[in-house]
Structures are given as C-alpha cells and as structure tokens.
Image (tube, rainbow, N blue to C red):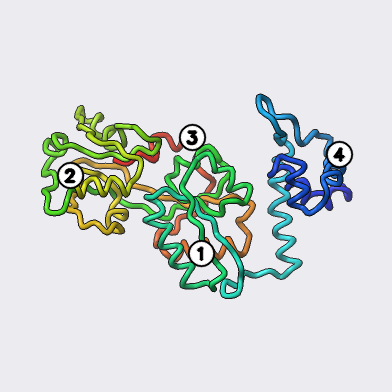
C-alpha cells in the first residue's frame, strides 16, 4: 500500500458515505479547504476522480472504485481502532442510541422484544429509537444512521451487500373476530370477505391469492390496509378473515379466534439486516447478540437475497 494512502483512508470513507466535501469535512472535524486538499491527494494516489457530478440532480456521487475501496477500508479501520483502543462495549456504562428500522409487523414480533431486552441488560444511557421501515432509507444502514433493519428478505434485495440473518420462521394462520367461526374448508374460506396488508398500499393480491390461483380458485379481498396492526383491528371489529403470521397474532392484545388455513402456504420469514461496516463493531455485536438470544432459530449470517432470489417473497401479507 502507498504510504500516502493510509492516513487518508478515514477521509475517503467519509467522502464516499457523505458524497459531499463539506459534510465529510464536518464529520472528520477539519475545514472544507483541508478536505478538498485531501480529496485532491486521493485522486492522485488512486488515479480515480472518486467523486463526480451526479447526473440529473445536484450534488456529487462516488465512483464504483471509490465505493469498493471505502468498503474495504471500513472494516480494516474498525478492526484497527478496536485493537489499538482495546475496545469493548460495556452496556452498563455506555452512552449509545441504537436506531432500528421496522414496519409494524416486524416491530411487534421482534423490535419491541429486542428493546425490552436492551432495557433489562443495559444501563440508562443506552436507548433505542424505532423508525418506520422505508426502503428509500436502506442507504442509512451504510451511512450509520440506522443500525439494524427488520423485515422480509425481499425488502433488502436492492442492497445485496447487506449482512442478513433469519430471526423468525413462522406459519400463517387464519384469524376472525372473537367468538367467530374460522373457515371450515377451502370453499368456506373463498366465500368469506378478507382483509389484506399491502406493503406498498392499495394492493388487493398477496401470497394467498397466488396459492389459490395455482388451484384455480380466488377469494374476495374486501379491505386493503397498509398496517398489520390495523388489519387485526379490522378483523376484531367486523366479519372479516385475515391470514397473518401466528407470532404477530400471538403478540397482539386482541383475543381473536384462530384456525389453520385450508391450503398450504409458504412459511413467513423475518430477517435482521445490517451493513458490513458495523459487523465487527462491539456495540453492534452486543445488540445482535441480544436479538439472537430472543430466538432459537439462529440461522447463518448471509448476504441479502438478490432480486431473483426474493421474487415472490414480498412484504404483502396473506
């Protein structure tokens, strides 16, 4: 490695993540002219422009080579920093905010239990912030603004570099209002009015409809909502059928009548995702360990699924 490059690597990482000279300078704690000089030096050493004008919008965008080098540098710098500092995460004394992104389904099943575990096992200065899941914010995992995201595998397909661990594998069940009768067979199931959760909003088909279509059958989705918890409330208040993960219904305060679906359905899968840049960070590892302790299914950590692998495993409920 060029001796000139090593001291410039933290600046390179900041430039790539912020895609702004002024923001990178603020993050590193130097003036904008000094950061501009470092960018100029990096361009010479690496023989690459590193940051170029963004097409169709204002601002800068990192080149592919800049991103590749920054990705490699993050882990090396984190490991070096930890080795030099002898760093460990003392949850009882630390000051740390963990930012977790999840929709209401994932938040109810895994997010809230994780936050309870953090409160029990950490000191008062370790806190959690729960953010609504937004695929447009997946880049915040790379930038460190979000520590952990919880969701369906397909939600992370657009960022294949993410680390992903399966935390919940569950089955779907049929839910009706308290005291109501669950569908007794496939004909009864298809003749009922259903509520469906559409992750993108306004959708009226999901995995159940695909499974029914394979059998030449269909159902009537009378209500489409964008919230899993709202679907539960809708079932509790009206003569509707919902097909939802058992773990979500078990965690709900509503005492709904539950039954088995009259057709086989693929399992419900919930994963945790994070960026490789924090994989060796002691505080982040501590958080992931707490999540692992909550669930028996500690599946291997993998990269996130490709779009082809995720096809058919979206966030729409049954």
Query: Who comes first in sequence, dot 4 or dot 2?
Result: 4
Q: Which residue is mark 4?
A: 40
Quadrant of image for the C terminus: top left
Front of the two marks 1 and 2: 2
Q: CB of mark 2 within 8 Å of CB of mark 3?
A: no
Q: CA distance from mark 3 to mark 4?
A: 37 Å
Query: Considering the numbered disc 1 on the image, is that residue within a helix, a strand or a loop?
Result: helix
Q: Which residue is mark 2?
A: 238
Query: Who comes first in sequence, dot 2 or dot 3?
Result: 2
Query: Considering the numbered disc 4 on the image, is that residue within a helix, a strand or a loop?
Result: helix
Left or right of residue 83, residue 169 in this image: left
Question: Measuring 47% from the left and 62% from the top, which residue is drawn there?
Answer: 291
> Could you say which quadrant of the image residue 241 lies in?
top left
Q: Which residue is mark 3?
A: 307
Image coordinates for residue 141, horizontal then vertical, percent: 58, 48
Q: CB of mark 3 within 8 Å of CB of mark 1?
A: no
Q: CA distance from mark 2 to mark 3?
A: 37 Å
Query: Who comes first in sequence, dot 1 or dot 4?
Result: 4
Question: Measuring 40% from the left and 58% from the top, which residue is drawn there?
Answer: 297
Dot label at residue 289: 1
Please tell me whether residue 231 is drawn above or below residue 216 in the rendered image: below
> Closer to the camera, 298 or 43?
43
Query: Considering the numbered disc 3 on the image, is that residue within a helix, a strand or a loop?
Result: helix
Front of the two marks 1 and 4: 4
Which residue is farthest top? 56
Question: Measuring 61% from the left and 68% from the top, which residue is drawn there?
Answer: 95
Question: Measuring 60% from the left and 51% from the top, which residue is drawn there?
Answer: 145
Query: Who comes first in sequence, dot 3 or dot 4?
Result: 4
> Closer to the camera, 242 or 1?
242
Image coordinates for residue 246, horizontal then vertical, percent: 28, 53
């Amino acid at each position: 490695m060029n001796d000139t490059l090593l001291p410039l690597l933290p600046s390179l990482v900041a430039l790539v993540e912020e895609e702004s000279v002024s923001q990178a300078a603020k993050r590193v704690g130097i003036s904008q002219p000094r950061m501009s000089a470092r960018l100029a030096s990096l361009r010479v050493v690496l023989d690459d422009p590193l940051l170029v004008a963004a097409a169709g919008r204002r601002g800068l965008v990192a080149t592919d080579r800049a991103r590749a080098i920054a990705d490699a540098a993050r882990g090396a710098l984190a490991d070096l920093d930890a080795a030099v500092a002898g760093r460990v995460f003392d949850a009882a004394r630390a000051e740390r905010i963990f930012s977790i992104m999840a929709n209401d389904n994932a938040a109810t099943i895994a997010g809230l239990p994780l936050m309870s575990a953090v409160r029990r096992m950490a000191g008062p200065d370790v806190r959690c912030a729960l953010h609504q899941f937004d695929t447009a914010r997946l880049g915040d995992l790379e930038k460190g603004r979000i520590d952990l995201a919880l969701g369906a595998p397909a939600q992370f397909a657009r960022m294949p570099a993410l680390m992903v661990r399966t935390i919940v594998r569950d089955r779907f069940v049929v839910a009706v209002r308290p005291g109501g009768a669950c569908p007794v067979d496939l004909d009864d199931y298809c003749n009922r009015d259903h509520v469906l959760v559409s992750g993108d909003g306004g959708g009226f088909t999901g995995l159940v409809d695909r499974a029914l279509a394979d059998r030449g059958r269909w159902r009537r989705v009378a209500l489409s909502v964008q919230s899993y918890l709202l679907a539960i409330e809708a079932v509790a208040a009206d003569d509707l059928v919902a097909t939802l993960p058992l773990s979500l219904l078990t965690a709900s305060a509503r005492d709904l009548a539950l039954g088995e679906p009259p057709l086989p359905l693929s399992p419900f899968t919930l994963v945790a995702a994070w960026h490789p840049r924090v994989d060796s960070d002691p505080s982040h590892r501590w958080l992931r360990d707490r999540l692992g302790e909550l669930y028996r299914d500690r599946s291997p950590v993998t990269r996130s699924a490709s779009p082809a692998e995720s096809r058919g495993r979206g966030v729409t409920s049954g």
